[in-house]
Amino acid sequence: MELTAAWQALQALKEPCHVNLFTDLEYLKRGITVSNIP
């Protein structure tokens, strides 16, 4: 659920920008940084 929420928040950005995402969930970190999504 948290991975989906983070992904949707990033997709909602309308312009390119730098984002700092803070989380204590290891699977969320891996899901965002180790991804096969183009």
Image (cartoon, rainbow, N blue to C red):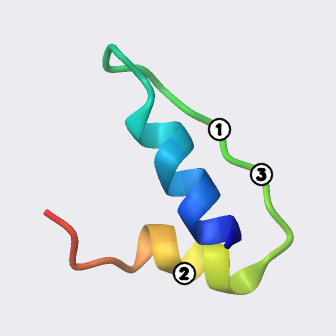
Binning the other alpha carbons within 10 Å of mark 1 as few (below 14), some (14 to 19) or many (20 upward) gives few
Residue plotted at (22% across, 79% down): 36
Q: Nearer the viewer, residue 4 or 35?
A: 4
The earlier-in-sequence mark between 1 and 2 is: 1
- Disc number for residue 22: 3
Q: Quadrant of the N terminus?
A: bottom right
Callout 1 secondary element: loop
15 sits to left or right of 32: left
- Disc number for residue 20: 1
**How many angstroms separate mark 3 from mark 2 (CA)?**
13 Å
Residue plotted at (47% across, 67% down): 32
Residue receiving disc 2: 30
Q: Are marks 3 and 1 in contact (CB under 8 Å)?
A: yes
**Residue 6 percent across, percent down from the top left:** 60, 53
Residue plotted at (49% across, 47% down): 8
Binning the other alpha carbons within 10 Å of mark 2 as few (below 14), some (14 to 19) or many (20 upward) gives few
37 sits to left or right of 25: left
